[in-house]
Amino acid sequence: MEAAVAFTRSLTLHLGLDRAPDPVAMSTERREEAPGDTCLASVHVVGAEGQRLRFMRKDGGFPVAFRKVPGDWSPYLLDLFTTLVEIRWRVMLLLFSLSYIVSWLFFGLCYWLMAYVHGDGGRGPCVLNVYDFTSAFLFSMETQATIGYGFRGVTENCGVAVAAVTIQDVTSCLLDTIVIGIVVAKMASARKRGQTVGFSRVAVVNRRDGVLCLSWRLGDFRGNHILEGVARAQLVRHSKQPRGPVLVSYQDVDIQERELILATPVLLVHKLQAGSPLYHIGPEGLPEEDFELLVSFTYMGDSTGTLHQTRTSYTPADIRWAQRFREVLKVGKKHYKADYALFHQTAWVATPMLSAEQYDRGRAPPGLLRSLRGKRGRCCMEEVIWQTRL
């Protein structure tokens, strides 16, 4: 009899029958198949989220400012091509425009000096129809841009002018090659393709096959198939010591089916089992946690064959307990239909309001849980006592 009472008490604690019914949990179970979007609703509220600094922004960027030695530009000059690819478009266009203008001014000055030194008022044997610096600048621009109006030109009587035109032509070819290469590389940047592959705005916790799981959604908004995609997740915790450095710890999070082909939206699942860094965290203690779940998807596009990566992060405020993602995939007669309008939407689902550790400790035999699934309150308690006595 004492063993029966002890088992009944542990089961009561597990089912939450010893306290007043939780209206949020009850409404969650009643609205298990609610079709509405619940991304902005949750069973917990984190009031201090606005004051918490994210380790990774939602767009995948890192709010990290590097402090270097003043005037030390060697890391950027050693890899000048990457520096030009990573700068903003307006800065790049300004630098390229200035490079052309400076080259025109430099060679225009050279032609004007040649005409001034070797000719009488610009009518000498070196450059024809160059009378002042303005006409020399126009001749330099016409030469480098291969306009060729046929009015100004270099004669064969001045070898220095012929060498200057040759050097300017070679410089023009090199400059055009650099500009075109950087513009093409910038337009084909992996960051732009990464914006068309995205994660859901929130992550959800629910029960799958009798196990509490944390899951988030991944999809390709362009509709192209992705080759050799690999998903990864890490849990990051950072803390500042009173008189010490900032400590940042990384812990890998196991994901089921890491390698996938992103033909349709997929659900990435992490089981909250023993060994998981989230195994001991429940819905009540989740707002007080200070961690960040970094998720990434590295893949190769079938159109260009370029390697890309999409990243985002989830804080405790982005995790929705007792919710699931709405179904976006339907089977048609000739093809599958993916409704991306429901990509971020979630719905309530019956889920134990316990941590995975507490849920595993107080889990009752499956037959007993099935008999209690549709009952609550005193009648459920009486049935537990009756079955225990048997």
Image (cartoon, rainbow, N blue to C red):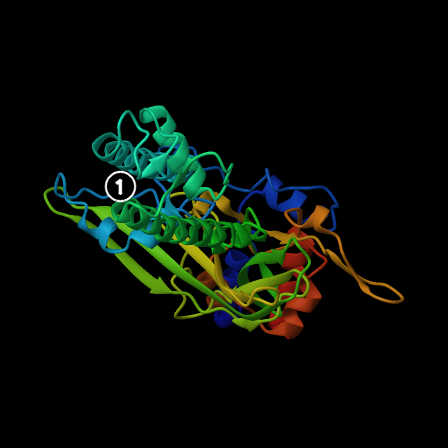
Above-or-below relation of 139 to 378: above
Q: Is residue 83 visible?
A: yes
Horizontal side of 231 relative to 324 (left or right) equals: left
Task: Give coordinates of residue 73: x percent, y percent.
Answer: 19, 45
Per the image, the residue denoted by label 1 is 65
Callout 1 secondary element: loop
Q: Residue at x 72, y 42 (%)?
A: 36
Determine the image quadrant of residue 110. top left
Closer to the camera, 40 or 372? Answer: 40
For the image, the number of numbered tags is 1
Q: Is residue 311 visible?
A: no
Task: Give coordinates of residue 155: x percent, y percent.
Answer: 36, 44
Q: Extreme left residue here?
A: 243
Above-or-below relation of 89 to 347: above
Q: Which of the image's four quarters has the C terminus?
A: bottom right
Task: Give coordinates of residue 189: x percent, y percent.
Answer: 48, 53
Closer to the camera, 140 or 261? Answer: 140
Horizontal side of 25 relative to 141 (left or right) equals: right
Q: Residue at x 30, y 36 (%)?
A: 111
